[in-house]
Amino acid sequence: MFYGEYSHSLDKKNRVIIPSKMRDALKEQYVEKLYMTRGLEQCLFVFPQEEWNRQETKFKNISFTHPDARKFNRLFFSGAFETVFDIQGRILIPQYLKEFARIDKDIMIIGVSNRFEIWSSENWKSFYKNSINSFEDIAEKLLNLEE
């Protein structure tokens, strides 16, 4: 559903325009609400409502007696922010999530199939630079797991 890399900037009110291809994909699926929360590697995860519901079901079924499950659920769900597009296709990034992802002004929006991620441009460049050389090795390991 979400693919590609897009460079954007936050406006003065901490809003960002979601790329038109992603907005079109959301409209095709009749998505009205998005859920944004803390992601991994200091990015923000943004889920359409239906995918958010799937993730919520999966995570709430993890036993709360396990300390890591409690910690993950607390951080993941306490960071959640429900949002909708404004008429210009923008969404708000709340200050606490902006701080978590170390976003200043320039951002990258990355399509990751069932969700998209919002990164500070600086963090994305660093992640990409440090990860691209291991792409083939990772693919080989993960694809061998499926066999």
Image (cartoon, rainbow, N blue to C red):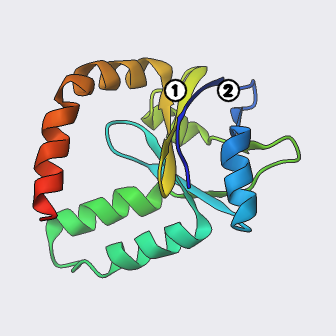
Q: Residue at x 69, y 63 (%)?
A: 33
51 left or right of 124 in image = right
Residue nearer the viewer, 77 or 25 = 25
Question: Left or right of 139: which side holds 97?
Answer: right
SS at badge 2:
loop
Q: Please, what is the three-letter code of the amino acid marked with disc 1?
A: Ile
Q: In the rendered view, tell whether residue 63 sits above or below residue 2.
A: below
Q: Tag 2: Cα neighbours inside 10 Å, few (<14), some, or many (≥20)?
A: some
- Which residue shows up at 74% across the image and 56% down it? 84
Q: Residue at x 17, y 54 (%)?
A: 143
Return the residue nearer the eye: 75 or 28. Answer: 28
* N-term mark: 2 or 1: 2
Label 1 environment density (alpha carbons within 10 Å; few <14, some 14–19, many ≥20): many
Q: Is residue 49 visible?
A: yes
Residue that carries the numbered disc 1 in the rendered image: 103
Q: Name the residue beneath numbered marker 2.
A: 10
Kindly check if marks 2 and 1 are in contact, taking CB atoms under 8 A apart as contact.
Answer: yes
Q: Where is residue 18 drawn, in percent x and y?
A: 69, 40
In which quadrant is the N terminus drawn? bottom right
Rendered location of residue 28, percent (x, y)? 73, 62
